[in-house]
Image (tube, rainbow, N blue to C red):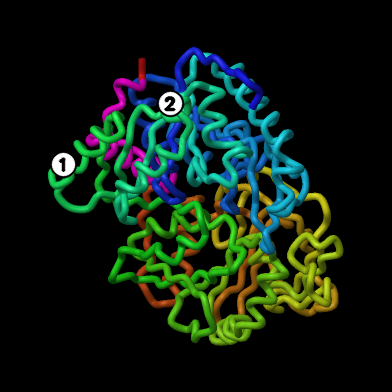
Amino acid sequence: MESGEKFKAIKKPIMVLGTSSGAGKSLTVTAICRILKNLGEEPIPFKGQNMSNNAWVDWNGGEMAYSQALQAFACGIVPSSDMNPILLKPQGNSTSEVIHLGKTKGVTTAKNYYKDWFIPGWEVIKKSLNSIYKKYPNCRLIIEGAGSPVEMNLIHRDLTNLRIAKYLNANCILVTDIERGGVFAQIIGTLELMKHEEKKLIKGIIINRFRGDLSLFEEGKKWIEKKTKIPVIGIIPWLNDRFPPEDSLDLLEKKSEFTNPEIKVGIIKLPSISNFSDFDPLENEKSILIEWVKKSQNLNNYDFIILPGSKQTIKDQIFLEDCGLSKDIREYSNNKGNIIGICGGLQMLGNTLNDPYFKEGSKGYSKQKIKGLGLLPLKTTFFEKKLTRQINSESLWPCQAKINGFEIHNGQTEFDTTHSSLKINPIFKDQDLGWYKENEKGGTIAGTYIHGIFENDNWRDQYLNLIRKRKNLPINNTKSLSYKIKRESIIDNLANEFNKHLTLESFLS
């Protein structure tokens, strides 16, 4: 940052920094956004740079991290890629796709990122801030940091923590996760590694995920405040949140609460899984138990399995073959199993995957064209240009319903004419958005390019009824509560719990 460079906002921004990754920054920002909205303020979420394969597409076709989209929903506004101007999408081997203001700009290695992308990255962050304040001049930015703000080998080129805090002269909150242990060292160590002018920006500390009697931490709170001269503005108890984790590795720790499910779902845990927020609506169905499938096993105890999206489809298809899951999935299909693939999962269900431009993980392998699972007569070719757009369509199967969602993919999928005797049917009126077929022995195989398909309540209900019918369960004729209403309720509950234990008054002057 240039010496003395500052940005003056009408309402002072609030920035949430963390002592580590996974400290709870995303949920804290989400809660504060809804709290301030309920107070009549105009909060806007912002994260200068996010690294995530859990993406969302705005109405201009721009990619952004799903967590910032969720925070925008908490603010009651339409998400925009301005709220997450830099998105890095990891694709293995220490490389990432670089997305600026929603559009792909290239691929970089971790080693070259700061050399090649630091200056343009800072410019795009400033551009997005100007755009937000032009559109919302009276807003209060609620900014999320990334990881730790004091990674000493990176701090001189950190785009998204203290650089933004100083540029906006934000009031900063430091969040730490007591569940991880070492909370005192986390706080003191983080503050000690800050420069004096940086430490002055920290106006409050939040202790997150506290289990047990909050009064038992009173002495610890006093010690922290005496040692740091910074008030502890909140001790947040352990909350049973149902939000998607930022990191796909955290999926392995995400366990369903429902112990007597009527339907059991297996989701294949691909190494390069993307857009796992697609399954949030299923996580919130009380009749469903979700398990993540990581290795070869008998899949017949699942009522249906899901092949999720992938950032590296060919690499993940090779993983399925190498670990034996491809064989398991084919056997499951032959045993009347029900399968649904989303985006990369749809592509894997086809016969062939062709990657002439090395877009989907074929680099380093001997073949750019490989076999898929062969369960749908489809072929996919990955082109250089990515398709990102919002979708408004209508489904034909398993019911007629209005469908909303979005697409993010390089691949173009079409019917494989070498298997012209096999019949598949379009799932949607827009026939290139998905296909299905019914096995002769029973069970269905379906694939769609639409992320967010399960957020469509009528479609989700009828698909689950299809599964219920095949399991000889009674058809559920009661219209389920809208997932979007459920999501609003979850955000409200999150905000209410934070509000009980959080003091924000000093940040709103």
Tally of marks:
2
For image coordinates 64% across by 62% down, the residue present is 310
Classified by dominant secondary structure, the portion drawn in magenta counts as: helix
Would you identify the image quadrant in which residue 443 lies? bottom right
Measured along the vertical axis of the image, is residue 379 above or below residue 336?
Answer: above
Magenta-drawn segment: 482-507
Q: Amino acid at mark 1?
A: Glu
Quarter of the picture containing the C terminus is top left
Q: Amino acid at mark 2?
A: Leu
Position of residue 181 measured from the top left corner of the image (x, y, whole percent): 31, 55
Asked if residue 14 is positioned above or below residue 153 in the image, the reply reads: above
User: Does residue 434 show up?
Assistant: no
* Residue depicted at 68% across the width and 77% down the height: 375
Q: Where in the figure is residue 331, as x and y percent of width and height?
A: 58, 87
Asked whether residue 427 is in view, the answer is yes
What is the secondary structure assignment of the residue under circle 1? helix
Disc 2, SS: loop
Residue 301 on the magenta span: no
Q: Quadrant of residue 373?
A: bottom right
Residue drawn at point x = 62 percent, y = 86 percent = 327
Q: Earlier in the sequence, mark 2 or mark 1?
A: 2
Q: Which class describes the residues within 10 Å of circle 2: few (<14), some (14-19), or many (20+)?
A: some
Left or right: where does residue 51 sit relative to residue 120? Answer: left
Q: Is 447 drawn above or below residue 138 in the view shown?
A: below
Q: Which residue is mark 2?
A: 201
- Residue 219's disc is 1
Vertically, is 298 above or below 352?
below
Q: Magenta stretch: residue 506 in it?
A: yes
Query: Dots 2 and 1: beta carbons under 8 Å?
Result: no
Whole-percent x and y of residue 185?
34, 48
Pick the front one: 436 or 101: 101
